[in-house]
Amino acid sequence: MTLAIMQPYFLPYIGYLQLMNTVDKFVFYDDVAFINRGWVNRNRMLVGGKEHLFTVPLQGASQNKTIREIALSSDPKWRGKLLKTVEQSYRKASHYEDVMPMLERIVNFEADNIADYIFHSFTELTAYLDITTALIPSSTIYENGHLKAQERILDICGQEGATHYINPIGGQELYDRQRFADAGVQLSFIQSKRVEYTQQAPEFVPWLSILDILMVNNVNDVRAMFGAFELV
C-alpha cells in the first residue's frame, strides 16, 4: 500500500494533487504546528494576467497551535470578496461555468477550523477530478503526537500497513532511506515537472493554484497533467 502525508493546503498547486492521485491513502497532517506565511491558507492565481496571492483569513493563528486548532475568520465578508475576485478574473475562462459552482461550495463551507475547511475542499476537488485516493486527517486516528518528525511518519506507515511512502522532493534531507528500509517501507520522493497550458496571462506563470488550471482545462486534460512527475 502506498501512502503520502502532507499538511492540508487550500487549493494547492498541481504537484500536491499529483502526489494525492499517485498514492492509495493520503493523510492530512492536521495536528502539527501551523506555519505562518506558509501555504496552508493561501495560494496564487491570476488577476488581470498577473500573479495574485489569495488568502483564507484566520483568527488566533499562531505557530504555537496545531493547524486544526486555528479557526477561520468570523467576518463573512472575505468569502464574498474571494468569490468576486475569482469571478472577475476568470469569468471568460473556458471552464468557468463548470468550476465556479464547486468553488462556491468550497468557499462558503462552514467549518470550526481551517483543517476541516480544507478537508471539505478536497472532498469537492477529488469528486470533480475523479481521484479515488482515501483521505485521512491525522488527528482522527493515530494518537502518536508524542513522536516527532521521521519517527512519527514511520509510525503512521506502520499503523496503515504501508509498504511505500512518497514525499515531496523537498523532504530529501529530512528522511533516511535506510531507516525506512529497516521498517519495511520503500521511500520515494516525487519531483513534479513543469506543466504549461494556455493561461490568461501574457507570459506563463508556473505553479499557480489548481484553481487556475481547472478554469482553463477540462478534467481529462488535468488528469493527464497528473502524470507529469518522476519518482526518485
Image (cartoon, rainbow, N blue to C red):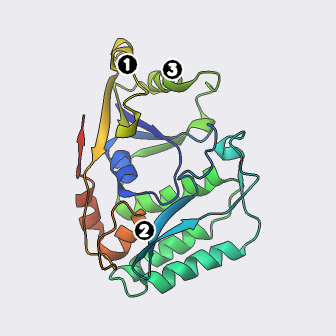
Left-right relation of 27 to 213: right
Quadrant position of the N terminus in the picture = top left
Circle 3 residue = 151
Question: Residue 77's image quarter?
Answer: bottom right
Q: In this view, does 203 lie above or below 186?
A: below
In front of the other: 33 or 23: 33
Residue at 39% across, 79% down:
49
Query: x, y (%) of residue 141?
Result: 59, 32
Q: In this view, does 144 lie above or below 108?
A: above
Left-right relation of 212 to 80: left
Residues at marks 2 and 1 touching, judged by CB atoms closer than 8 Å: no
- Residue furthest to the top: 182
Query: x, y (%) of residue 54?
Result: 55, 68
The mark that comes first in sequence, 3 or 2, is: 3
Circle 1 residue = 180
Where disc 2 sits, the SS reads helix
Residues at marks 3 and 1 touching, judged by CB atoms closer than 8 Å: no
Q: Is residue 83 above or below residue 182?
A: below
Circle 2 residue = 211
Where disc 3 sits, the SS reads helix
